[in-house]
Image (cartoon, helix red, strand yellow):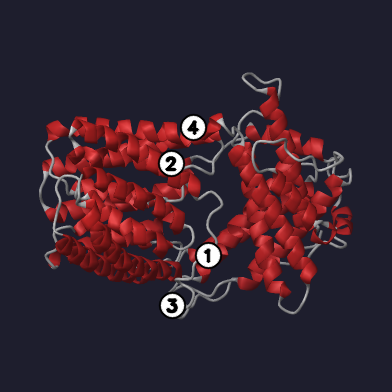
């Protein structure tokens, strides 16, 4: 099959700073389809230890149990077998961060040292969360907890007991996170499959709409559909055993996974051939995945589907990329880690220079900003400032009720935790309106404080953290962003050649899909970066189109009964007829 030859690398010249947007930064979007799961989980996981400590008269220890309880926010998108492992690692990571903070706090009272340790911890937490993709909410919860405990008075003798409380809160969070498995054992996989079907239907509808503006919309819809299909396959692969005869396999669960896989195959076929897809049928199958009823059957089993399911079983036995490979010196995560460390340190020291008693608030503000590029970091900075300023007004309104007693304080914190998760997926600033008063109220479990003093400190630390955090993002350049695009393009070309060489290798097709998703993510990240050479935009477009055409060809040949063994490239080219450009 012919392909577009790679263009020469463009000359290395600095790109001009891009305009930082304001329009649309605060516009609410659609909420996450599972927003209520982390919202309800964090309320239950916090209520149990909080009420227990209230009964014991030790609400001053809430900060340590809360560190573990907030682990209930994580891993709701993962199948339960994978969620059990992920939540265990989240609890372990949270406990490790708290341990470092508590030991440091017990050994020194120097604010300068504490800020430095907090900045390094924030960078490490950001890097590990991005490398493991354990989000949302990513590193921010880890940084919030570890930074707060850094500035809590501590002795070495108290550290074991406080860590035990964190582990106890984490155990409750683990149980809360796993509890839905009793009611919907395949809920996460069903939701991931439904997202893939809806995204494929949206792409097919965008292609069918036509019109002068349909090209860009169809490209966005295709990228979203490819990402959703890839995520669905990843979710199914994370469920574990695919053979009913394997040790420990449950026949009913395996059959459910197979039925879901057939639906993902249909979504993948719609992605490859949108003109032949039926968006109404795709949406109907997605709607049928709600609840616990039988998985919708997509009709006659097609010739290539058996190979698809066998390919899944073989893929489970394949090697996995170790974590350390994602953290090599050339990793795209490292410039963001450096930004986080520098920005958090500047924010903390800036707060100290102004005489603020809680520099960790400025540190956490800076840590919350860092996204994939400067433009997204700026957007998050605007959202953080607006959300915090409105949030302190909300705190002023809530404080009189919360100060009525400890029960009212607990109820206020739980309600704000629920509100934060209900709103944050619509826009970060809306969630911050609830997070800010909750963070202020947490400081009052030991003793009630004057609201005016807390409000002033929070406003100043927010502005210091946002300004210095964005400044660090601009000054600490990420010149590797364009290089990451080059590497992603090369990965797509290698994956495309492998898929063309053996059309029956469904795992090779999935690797090509994953490479295309990574390429789009790298291109989007680099598009908002400053101080770098010109981006190879035409090369990215050519690689994406060639990759999607190869996917279309392989899906067509497999679903039509072909694709067994290796086919000459001219036969693959014949299968391109009618494939989307």
Q: Is residue 331 visible?
A: no
Write down the quadrant of residue 215 in the picture: bottom right
Query: Which callout, 3 or 2, points to the residue nearer the camera?
Result: 2
Q: Earlier in the sequence, mark 1 or mark 3?
A: 3
The residue tagged 2 is 41
Q: In terms of secondary structure, where does tag 2 sit?
A: helix
Foreground label between 1 and 3: 1
Provide residue 195's location: percent of width, then percent of height.
Answer: 65, 51
Q: Earlier in the sequence, mark 4 or mark 3?
A: 3
Residue at left 24%, top 68%?
464
Q: Position of residue 324 (x, y in %)?
A: 45, 43
Q: Which residue is mark 1?
A: 29
Residue where numbered disc 4 is placed: 179
Label 4 vs label 3, nearer the camera: 4
Of marks 4 and 1, which one's residue comes earlier in the chain? 1
Real-space Cα separation, disc 4 to disc 3, in angstroms:
44 Å
Camera sees residue 261? yes
Q: Residue at x 35, y 58 (%)?
A: 434
Separation of disc 1 and disc 2 at Cα? Answer: 23 Å
- 74 on left or right of 402: right
Question: Residue at position x 81%, y 43% from top?
Answer: 298
Foreground residue among 15 and 470: 470
Q: Are marks 3 and 2 in contact (CB under 8 Å)?
A: no
- Whichever of callouts 3 and 2 sits on the residue coming sooner in the sequence is 3
Crowding at dot 3, Cα within 10 Å, few <14 / some 14-19 / many 20+, comes out as few
Of mark 1 and mark 2, the one earlier in the sequence is 1
Say which quarter of the image contains residue 393. Answer: bottom left
User: Mark 2 and mark 4: span between their CA atoms?
Assistant: 10 Å
For the residues labelled 1 and 3, the Cα–Cα distance comes to: 20 Å
Numbered tag placed on residue 20 in the rendering: 3
**Front-most of residues 36 and 198:** 36
How many dots with numbers?
4
């Amino acid at each position: 099959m012919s392909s577009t030859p790679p263009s020469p690398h463009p000359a290395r010249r600095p790109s001009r700073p891009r305009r930082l947007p304001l329009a649309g930064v605060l516009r609410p979007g659609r909420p996450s389809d599972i927003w209520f799961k982390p919202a309800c989980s964090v309320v239950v996981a916090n209520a149990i230890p909080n009420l227990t400590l209230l009964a014991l008269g030790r609400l001053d220890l809430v900060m340590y149990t809360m560190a573990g309880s907030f682990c209930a926010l994580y891993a709701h998108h993962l199948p339960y077998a994978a969620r059990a492992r992920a939540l265990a690692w989240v609890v372990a990571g949270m406990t490790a961060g708290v341990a470092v903070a508590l030991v440091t706090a017990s050994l020194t009272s120097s604010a300068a040292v504490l800020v430095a340790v907090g900045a390094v911890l924030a960078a490490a937490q950001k890097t590990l969360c991005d490398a493991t993709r354990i989000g949302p909410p990513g590193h921010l919860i880890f940084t919030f907890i570890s930074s707060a405990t850094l500035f809590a008075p501590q002795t070495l003798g108290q550290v074991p007991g406080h860590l035990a409380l964190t582990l106890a809160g984490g155990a409750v969070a683990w149980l809360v996170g796993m509890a839905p498995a009793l009611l919907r054992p395949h809920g996460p996989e069903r939701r991931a499959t439904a997202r893939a079907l809806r995204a494929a239907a949206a792409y097919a509808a965008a292609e069918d709409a036509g019109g002068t503006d349909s090209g860009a919309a169809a490209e966005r819809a295709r990228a979203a559909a490819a990402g959703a299909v890839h995520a669905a396959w990843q979710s199914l692969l994370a469920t574990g055993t695919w053979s009913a005869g394997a040790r420990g396999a449950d026949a009913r669960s395996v059959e459910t996974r197979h039925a879901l896989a057939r639906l993902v195959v249909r979504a993948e076929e719609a992605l490859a051939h949108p003109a032949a897809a039926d968006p109404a049928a795709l949406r109907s199958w997605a709607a049928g995945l709600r609840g616990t009823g039988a998985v919708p059957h997509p009709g006659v089993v097609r010739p290539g589907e058996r190979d698809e399911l066998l390919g899944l079983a073989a893929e489970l036995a394949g090697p996995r990329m170790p974590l350390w490979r994602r953290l090599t010196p050339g990793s795209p995560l490292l410039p963001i880690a450096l930004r986080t460390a520098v920005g958090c340190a500047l924010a903390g020291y800036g707060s100290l220079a102004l005489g603020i008693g809680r520099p960790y608030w400025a540190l956490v503000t800076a840590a919350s900003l860092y996204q994939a590029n400067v433009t997204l970091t700026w957007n998050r900075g605007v959202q953080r400032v607006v959300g915090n300023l409105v949030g302190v007004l909300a705190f002023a309104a809530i404080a009189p009720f919360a100060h009525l007693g400890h029960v009212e304080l607990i109820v206020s914190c739980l309600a704000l935790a629920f509100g934060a998760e209900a709103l944050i997926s619509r826009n970060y600033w809306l969630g911050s309106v609830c997070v800010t008063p909750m963070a202020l109220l947490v400081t009052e479990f030991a003793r009630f404080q004057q609201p005016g003093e807390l409000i002033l400190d929070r406003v100043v630390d927010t502005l210091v953290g946002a300004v210095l955090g964005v400044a660090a993002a601009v000054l600490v350049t990420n010149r590797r962003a364009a290089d990451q695009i080059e590497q992603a393009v090369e990965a797509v070309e290698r994956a495309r050649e492998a898929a063309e060489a053996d059309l029956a290798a469904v795992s090779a097709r999935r690797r090509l899909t994953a490479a295309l998703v990574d390429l789009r993510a790298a291109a989007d990240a680099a598009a908002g970066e400053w101080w770098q050479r010109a981006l190879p935009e035409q090369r990215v477009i050519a690689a994406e189109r060639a990759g999607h055409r190869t996917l279309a060809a392989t899906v067509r040949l497999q679903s039509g009964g072909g694709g067994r063994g290796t086919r000459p490239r001219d036969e693959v080219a014949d299968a391109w007829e009618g494939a989307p450009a």
